[in-house]
Amino acid sequence: MALIAAVFTVCLASGYGYAFGGRQQCGRSMASTRIVGGQTASRGSWPWMAKLQLNFDTPKGPLTQGAHCGGSLISNQWILTAAHCTNEWPDDYTVNSIFATFGDEEEGNQIYVNISQHYLNGFNKTNFKDDIALYKLERPLDFNGQDSSLEPICLPPRGLNIPAGAKCTVTGWGVTSTNGTESRTLGQVQLPIVDNGLCSLKWGASFRPATQLCAGYLFGGEDFCQGDSGGPFNCQLANGAYVAQGNGFGEQQCGRSIASTRIIRGQTASRGAWPWMIKLNYMFNTSKGPDTDGAQCGGALISDQWILTAAHCTNEWPDDYKVNEIAVTFVDTDERSQYYVDINQIYLNRFNKTNFENDIALYKLNKPLDFNGEHNFLGPICLPPRGLNIRAGAKCVATGWGRTATNGNGSAILRQVSLPILENSVCSMRWRNLFRSTKKLCTGYLLGGKDICQGDSGGPFNCQLGDGTWVAYGIISFTDKRGCGLPFTPTVFTRVAPYISWIEAITGLTF
């Protein structure tokens, strides 16, 4: 991630050194003051660390150890964690048990205790306000007996204000890379506290400095990841004691691809190279009967439930055709990992089908995807920074399952083509009133040969930033109806950045 790594909910206590139940010994660690970032934690370094694991009843049967978060002991019977750990699963999943694990999977000192109650404080899952929760263990721990390997962390003094630039430590068993596997041993990474103004710039109204904390490296590289949510931000006071200064949530990982920076133009895409790519399939009722193989467009996942595509994909069919279903297909038709989801809502933004103005749409899936579970082969693309302006001559990548030749058949496998960005004047000359440079993008080869084609509409124009992240810089809008790859016929994309405020307003997400 290129800007802000994480936001933490601030935890403030009545006074240093006191945990619930009157116990005064807390926050003692074997960890040295100087933590080695991003490495395995020494055994016993963080004796308050808990892993929360949830067992579900699902439509497909029981799912044991289906999800986990971190947490920290603050007494012999209470765990502090994040509220979003309590309700971040599909609507048709029912939690039948929650238990806490202490100690590493690879060590013989694991302790399991069931959770009997949990408490939230007005948590708002849309903007992560009040992202804090308390879990009560079904039995007290015995710090002086069988549970002597454990100890609570202290809560910080109410007035504690650690300055920007100071470093504290995040701990957890989360995945060690985007879309990677969970760690079997406790990991730790040291993160600097960042000025609140930077998180306000990145997260907008979702960041509340009175109850949240901004931390991370501006150029990425070290951070927490999925499965670490709810764990403490361990800050060491001058007397050596550690306090839980916050519980974290981070930006949803996006724009990570196994594609190399240099794309081979006009060829088959490597499997997994574009994990946000989707195919929209439309089924119609027509005057001649059902048409189940009617039309297709591309699109891109921008979250676990939202697709970005072109508005003209929504109404580009004869007047006597009525859409009875729109289905989303992920990955290629010749792969076993295909997955289908229906669309239940569509949003346009004053689309003009005459001049293709505002050719952008949002489709909402009828259920969220599970990027950390059954849909771990998928991932969202990032939206571009609002002020991003990529110079003419730079190349980005269009992806889709459209035709590979004029009047040809659609491709069974995902394809990619690298296209250069052209000066706006080229498209203004060719397309005249159809091209408005403030919200559209001009691309292609002046001599033709390589281009997008029918069936590719709505797919993203994938541009890679300096830190390796891919962003949806544009959406495939239109080219010449006479054919594909014609000379002196540039392709027009809808710019995404001018519509980010609209996207946020519709989805309730912050980009």
Image (spheres, grey):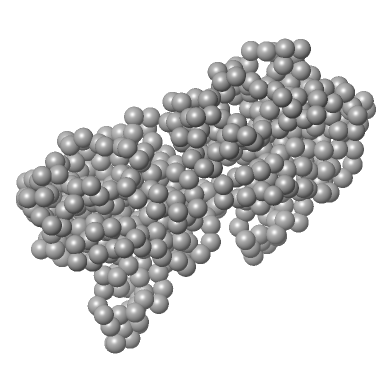
Which residue is at the front of the view, 357 or 464?
A: 357
| Left or right, 343 with reference to 171 | left
Q: In this picture, is 275 found above or below 297?
A: above
Q: In this picture, is 175 found above or below 119?
A: above
The answer to whether any part of residue 268 appears in the image is no
Q: Where is residue 507 in the image (x, y as percent from the top left)?
A: 47, 55
Q: In this picture, is 273 found above or below 346?
A: above
The answer to whether any part of residue 161 appears in the image is yes
| Left or right, 301 with reference to 28 | left
Q: Which residue is drawn at 56% across and 27% down?
A: 215
Q: Which residue is drawn at 18% across and 51% down?
A: 436
Q: Position of residue 179 (x, y in %)?
A: 51, 41
Q: In this picture, is 79 found above or below 39?
A: below
Which residue is at the front of the view, 224 or 399?
A: 224
| Left or right, 237 with reference to 202 | right
Q: Which residue is drawn at 63% across and 38% down?
A: 229
The quarter of the rendered structure image containing the N terminus is top left
